[in-house]
Every structure is written in structure tokens, then in C-alpha cells.
Image (cartoon, helix red, strand yellow):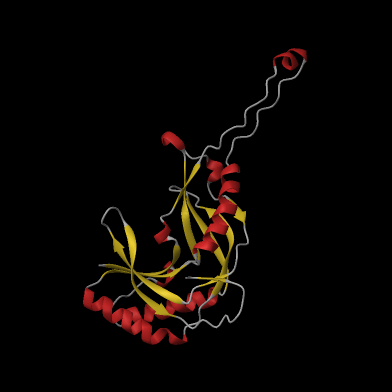
Amino acid sequence: MQLHAVVAVPEEAIRATVLDAVPALIAATAPPEPEPERGLLARWRRRPAEPLAPVVSFAPAAPESVFVKIAKFGNVTADVAGDLAAELEEAAGAWHAPVLRVTKVVVAESAPYTVTAELEGDVDALREIYRNVLEVAALHRFYLDRRNFRPEIVLGRLEAPDGAAVPEAVAGLELDRSGPWWSADHLSLLRASFSGGAGFADYARISLDDDAGGAEIYRLA
């Protein structure tokens, strides 16, 4: 099976970010209004201008793939997957559950124009979880690239209709957004599922040390 370690994100936190940011992102790609005609003849034939449609649309990521990616183990046997889950569970009791929020929504600078949400907050704690997962993986000879970690969430991608080219102005577009604070009290192990299309299914949940107390943050149900 293909096994992935991720930090899941509460649906409420993503909904708040996407509902707020995506319409603004799409509106930012609309072509500029044409210059109005001038003169007496122009006033005589002027009609109310229809608003120009945005030139791109947003294709959201599948709900089960909206997470912070920690590590990809690749193909593992059922026995190795079970050992990994048990060893991560044993090690993770002292791992701090980071409290995070979205700070910016960014469009990739080249195709497929992925839209990601960048994070702020306990990013160092998130990075520490990443390092710890790699150390456990190394016990099973999974030597993963430490440079692959990024504190971000893939929300979806921008697409142009009917195969048209995405405007150059879209590349690298950024919107500052401050989403709600959220915390997950576990690390998820997901197995890739290819029945009926690629997706993910829960394999195991690894408990983290959630010491956020009574803070007003979103948590996973």
C-alpha cells in the first residue's frame, strides 16, 4: 500500500478560508473594464455594460486530501505499516500538537496553478513532528528527503475554461488572509485508495500532546 503521514485540518477552518479567499482570488483575475466611449454619439448608443466574467475557475481539492503533508513512505507491506503505526504511537506522546492558522493564499507560478494556503503559528512544532516522523521511518530504511516539508495546505487549482490559457497575471498571485486558529490532536496515517479514482482513507491516528487548554480554536471532531 501507499502510506502517507499528514496533519489533518478541521473542515470549519478550511471552509472559513476558502469561502473568504477564493471569490476574491477569482475576481482578481477578471479582465479590466474597457474604456468608455466619449462624445455625443457614445451617449446616445450607450447601454448598461454587462460585468466581465472571470477568466478562470477554482477546482477544489478532494476533501480527504486537504491536509498538511508530513511524509510519504511509498509502497509498504501490511506488516511494515503496522510496525510504523505502533512505533509512531509510542514516540508521539511527547510531540506537541501545533496551533496554526492560514496567513496567506498563494497561486503557483506555473501550471497546474495550484492554490495553497500558507500557515503561521507553531510552525516550528510542525517541523519537529516532521523530523520525528523521518527518524522513525529511518528505522525501517525509509530515507526521506528532509527538504520536502512545507507548512502549507493544498486547496485546489485554478483552471481556464475550454482549454484556454491561464493568464500570466494569475501566476504567483497572493492574497493575505488570516483564518481561524486550529489544532489537531493527532497525526494521521493515510493509505492511498485507487478504487473509483485516487483518494485517501484512514489507516491509523497517532495521538499528539494537545496542551492548548481552553483556547478558542477549531479541533478535529
Q: Farthest residue in the front direction?
A: 221
| Residue 9 can be seen, yes or no | yes
- The number of discs equals 0
Which of these two is toward me, 129 or 79? 79
Left or right of 78 in this view: 144? right
Residue under the image location 74 percent in, 12 percent down: 41
Q: Which quadrant, please, contains the N terminus?
A: bottom left
Residue 143 appears in which quarter of the rendering? bottom left
Q: Position of residue 10 (x, y in %)?
A: 50, 66
Left or right of 128 in this view: 169? right
Residue under the image location 50 percent in, 78 percent down: 97
Q: Position of residue 69 (x, y in %)?
A: 42, 67
| Residue 138 can be seen, yes or no | no
Vertical position of residue 93 compared to residue 195: above or below? below
Residue under the image location 60 percent in, 53 percent down: 20
Which of these two is toward me, 66 or 70? 66
Residue under the image location 56 percent in, 34 percent down: 53
